Amino acid sequence: MFREIRFFFTALMFYTRIPCPKWVDHNPIYMKESARYFSLIGWIVGGIGAGVFWVVNMLYSVEISLVLSMASTIRITGAFHEDGLADVGDGFGGGWTKEKIILIMKDSRLGTFGVLSLVLVLLLKYSSLRSIPTDWIPLTLIAGHVLSRVVAARMLVRGNYVSNNSDNKSENAAKKLSLTSFMINLVIGLSVFLFFNNWLFLLVIIPLFVCEELMYRFYYKWIGGYNGDCAGAVQQITEVLFYLGLLALWKFI
């Protein structure tokens, strides 16, 4: 039991800025399998975003509430996944060889492709959430954060990790995830559908896994696998895809 608790707190320490007990460290063994609670982190981050939206919306408009909600999730994660998305945008947008792509992704400076990637994804995230009925936004926020992390964890099971030699802690957390850990992620993640009122909402997860498959194939073609930034980009893009899929599904339910 203590081992599982340590896995959880290691995940909480690595994927968020939430304070953790002092005995939680960057032990490589726990870092590697900490992603087994990636979807549970999604419950926490999404719950914070939903809570901020609900409280702010008591006083202000939906637009202001959404912006502050998005800001809260970015703050609580330290823009961890947004940074990965930007690095992927710069790397694959500006590099034409494996070595060049990885070199650009290691660069801490933000380039044109990274800025455009962030702006477009954040605009899509805001616009799609704004189009959802207000009463559904809190649950949608939670589900988007949870399910996108389940899909990102699927990529970690593949195990074709490409090192960029930039951060050993990140590498330990992004390397091959065991099938057992992924199944834990999947069960925790799919539990979010218990709060939806129609089983057809389950269909929205299909395009998320299709997207992960296509993104992985793209990564594999150019750099022979994935790294932590690639997984972060998968989380961001599939989160937006979930919101868009939900909007499309609503037209038929």
Image (cartoon, rainbow, N blue to C red):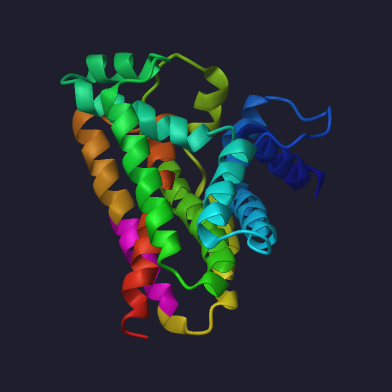
Q: Residue at x 59, y 69 (%)?
A: 191
Asked whether residue 207 is drawn in magenta, I would say yes
Region rendered in magenta: 201-210
Where's residue 118, x and y in %?
37, 36
Q: Give left or right: position of 100 versus 199.
A: left
Q: Give left or right: position of 67 versus 58.
A: left
Q: Quadrant of residue 43?
A: bottom right
Q: Residue at x 37, y 74 (%)?
A: 203
Q: Is residue 83 visible?
A: yes
Of the pair 119 and 139, the residue shown nearer to us: 119
Where's residue 153, x and y in %?
47, 47
Asked whether residue 168 is drawn in magenta, I would say no
Q: Quadrant of residue 120?
A: top left
> In what quadrant of the picture does the C terminus appear?
bottom left
Q: Residue at x 39, y 70 (%)?
A: 246
Q: Is residue 49 above or below residue 71?
A: below
Of the pair 27 and 40, the residue shown nearer to us: 40
Q: Is residue 32 above or below residue 143?
A: above
Q: Give left or right: position of 124 versus 28.
A: left
Where's residue 133, x and y in %?
48, 73
Q: How many marks?
A: 0
